[in-house]
């Protein structure tokens, strides 16, 4: 059964196809409005979410399907001690496809191994978030026309930010890329990603703590929130949370065609005054996320023969 657990589960050709379908949905929404009639998406969210869960639900509704699910662990049988494997087997009796978010790394993989329907990883702990990456890739492709020869800056919590991990993996398969990793020392990109992705593929990268000194080099600036829920110690969070605040004056040396991205939710790391800058793309990412999730649901249901 084909699932989406890690962005690398899909080839670059498959990602191109998903982007093409998403673009077609944007152009011709009516053509898709009954494609999932009679089909059900289960959203199993063991962790908070606004965009990811509601965009999955909106995606399925716009395909003519229906949705069921829960939005907090406490309202599911997980609170009684049920295993992820049993939950996955159970939901397979009710739905055609699952989107699951879980605080434990690897939980959606366990669900996929036990479900008889496709499972989509909607975020697992500080590990991966492949469908945010799909939204990011659609945005980059629409803003930049492709993925090659870009200098991409990631700024903020690169240690726990799962959207960063998945996007770096996805982009690492294209040529001519350079990454600029901007974070406090305590929140640097995990060394396993540097070793298994960046060094393995010989991708040039630089690490810095200073956003303003590198902003002029960037084609894309991907800002992130410091991931409070992954900290062991509130004092560390409070010390690090406002490490970077993007304000209009800091964009003085940025390229005129910079794309400013953020998976959202934002806390303080982008001032609202930046929202009116034509380079701000983060609300476009939200909308793109719905369209590419429609394309993903269609692909996985078709491959599952449902
Ligand atoms: C992200 C996540 O859940 O990892 N949010 C999202 O899905 N767009 C980013 C975040 O929570 O900081």
Image (tube, rainbow, N blue to C red):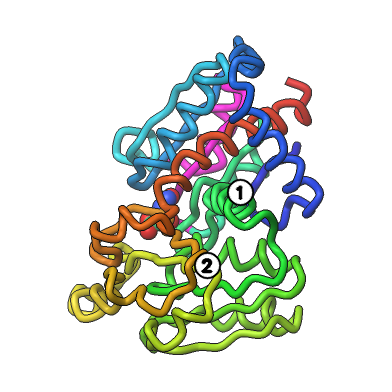
Point 45% across, 59% down: residue: 261
Q: Which residue is mark 1?
A: 142
**Which element type, helix, strand or loop, lies under badge 2?**
strand
* Left or right: residue 284 compared with residue 303: left
The foreground one among 294 and 69 is: 294
Q: Which residues are magenta?
A: 82-104
The foreground one among 82 and 57 is: 57
Query: x, y (%) of residue 77?
Result: 38, 34
Query: x, y (%) of residue 151?
Result: 60, 75
Residue 99 sits above or below residue 157 on the image: above
Query: x, y (%) of residue 223?
Result: 41, 66
Q: Which residue is mark 2?
A: 220
Query: x, y (%) of residue 210?
Result: 38, 87
**Which element type, helix, strand or loop, lies under badge 1?**
helix
Residue 71 sits above or below residue 158 on the image: above
Point 78% across, 54% down: residue: 12
- Residue count near mark 1 (Cα–Cα under 10 Å), binned few <14, some 14–19, many ≥20: some
Task: Tell me, yes or no, whether the highlighted magenta stretch contains residue 101.
Answer: yes
Point 78% across, 31% down: residue: 303
Point 41% across, 55% down: residue: 278
Image quadrant, ligand 1: bottom left
């Amino acid at each position: 059964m084909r699932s989406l657990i890690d962005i690398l589960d899909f080839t670059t050709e498959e990602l191109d196809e998903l982007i093409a379908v998403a673009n077609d949905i944007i152009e011709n929404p009516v053509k898709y409005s009954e494609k999932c009639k009679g089909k059900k998406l289960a959203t199993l969210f063991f962790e908070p979410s606004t965009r990811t869960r509601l965009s999955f639900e909106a995606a399925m509704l716009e395909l003519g399907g229906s949705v069921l699910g829960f939005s907090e662990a406490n309202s599911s049988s997980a609170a009684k001690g049920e295993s992820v494997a049993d939950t996955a087997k159970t939901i397979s009796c009710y739905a055609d496809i699952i989107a699951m978010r879980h605080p434990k790394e690897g939980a959606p993989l366990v669900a996929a191994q036990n479900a008889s329907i496709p499972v989509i990883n909607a975020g697992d702990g500080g590990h991966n978030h492949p469908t945010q990456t799909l939204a990011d890739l659609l945005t980059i492709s629409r803003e930049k026309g492709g993925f090659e020869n870009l200098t991409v800056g990631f700024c903020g919590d690169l240690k726990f930010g799962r959207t960063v991990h998945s996007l770096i993996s996805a982009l690492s398969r294209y040529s001519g890329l350079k990454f600029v990793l901007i974070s406090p020392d305590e929140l640097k990109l995990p060394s396993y990603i540097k070793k298994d992705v960046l060094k393995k593929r010989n991708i040039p990268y630089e690490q810095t703590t200073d956003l303003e000194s590198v902003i002029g080099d960037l084609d894309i600036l991907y800002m992130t929130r410091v991931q409070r829920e992954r900290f062991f110690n509130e004092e560390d969070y409070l010390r690090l949370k406002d490490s970077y605040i993007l304000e209009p004056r800091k964009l003085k040396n940025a390229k005129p065609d910079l794309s400013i991205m953020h998976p959202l939710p934002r806390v303080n790391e982008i001032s609202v005054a930046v929202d009116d800058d034509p380079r701000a793309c983060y609300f476009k990412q939200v909308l793109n996320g719905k369209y590419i999730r429609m394309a993903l649901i269609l692909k996985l249901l078709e491959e599952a023969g449902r």
